Image: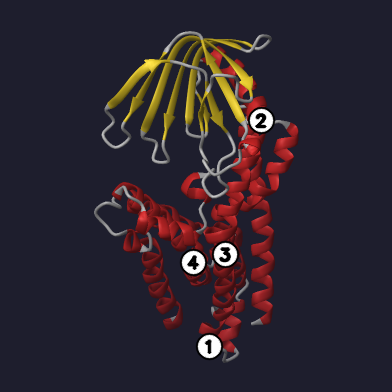
Amino acid sequence: MKYISGEFTATFALTLVVVTAVWVLGVTILAVRHELLGPRAFLRAMPLMVVISFKYTLPMAVLFGASISYGRMSADNEIRAMEWSGIHVGWAIVPAAMVAVGASAVSLAFDCELIPAAERRLSRVLRSTILETIDRQLSRSAQGDIPIVIGYYSVRIGGYDAATKTIRNITVFQTDESRRPILQIDAPGAAIRAGKVLGAIPIVIDENQPESKRRYVTFEFQGGVVKEFDPRSGSMTRQYAAPPVAIDLSADKDRDAGLAGLSSAKLAKYSREAEDPRDRLDARVRFFERCALGVSPFFFVLLAAPMASLVRWRHNLTAFLPSLAIVMVIYYPLLMWAKVWAARVDPLYGMFAGNAALLLIAAGTICVLLRR
């Protein structure tokens, strides 16, 4: 058992490092390509992106580690040797189950607490460099007619002069956490300023934040009109001339990343106490998604270990293909369908449907292995 646990843990750890590095590299290329972060901000954001990546990389690393370890043992007839030595083949799965329990505990801690905290800190890093980001993105947006997303604000422009920081033909949209429209501003021109200028109407995200600690970006519109909407019905409620608008960038630490940044305890509370039923449903879906993904490494290992033990391919590196195919074809589609059908199927059951499916397949595979 010690030998199997050690090999599995070593393979899992190495795989986790490699998969996480590839994931972060992909995010890095995306950030550099779209000029989302400056060099200093990127260095601050890198550790946070590593933590966030564990939501996706840790389960796959466990799956790969179990498949490779048990696939090699099967290819080298080590499992057969255990049987011939009088050791029940079921004992070969016990070390994998023990490691899986530990991996699930770590994954659950990351998904429910550490990743939301990293989401909040990453959001604050993005906000701290928002002026630099806006300047770069405005230049890029003016060339390719690409909208700029700043928190819950979306900005589309027709042209931008970086020297004078003036904008031609600007449209600003504001949405709530559920991406429902709140406000729209259309103007033939605007200029951006650091801080809140005299006469600007502040859009404050956190009313309890002291004025001295708020960070503003002000759009001074040259003419234009403001349209306000009721987020629930989508109908326009008011229209008036566009004054300067100062957008506060210092949101509350638990709100600046939306529901993704809420701790699991606060997310569960929000799912019960939110006024809008759609908001309660969204929070409930996110909460049970965290729980389901958090315990998924246990079910991934229960699937991969016995399945790889049955596969006796010459190239043991391919032993992960059957279990990977099942995860990609069954587990993740069920997870996505649970989000789509959340209004009809309780998220408590929908989000765990993938885990239940893996458990049934794993049970059947273990029965075949024991009978062999």
Q: Position of residue 95 (x, y in %)?
A: 59, 78
Residue designated by label 3:
109
Cα distance between the residues tagged 2 and 3: 30 Å
Which of label 4 and label 1 is nearer to you? 4
Residue sitting at 50 percent across and 20 percent down? 146
Residue sitting at 52 percent across and 41 percent down? 206
Q: Amino acid at mark 3?
A: Ala
Name above or below for residue 333 compared with residue 226.
below
Cα distance between the residues tagged 4 and 1: 27 Å
Q: Secondary structure at mark 2?
A: helix
Q: Relative to the observer, which residue lies in front, 240 or 321?
A: 240
Residue designated by label 4:
295
Q: Secondary structure at mark 1?
A: loop
| For residue 226, side relative to residue 191 (left or right) | left
Query: Going from the N terminus, do you reach mark 1 or mark 2 first?
Result: 2
Which of label 3 and label 4 is nearer to you? 3
Residue designated by label 1:
88
| For residue 39, side relative to residue 198 (left or right) | right
Asked whether disc 3 touches disc 4, contact meaning CB atoms under 8 Å apart, the reply is no
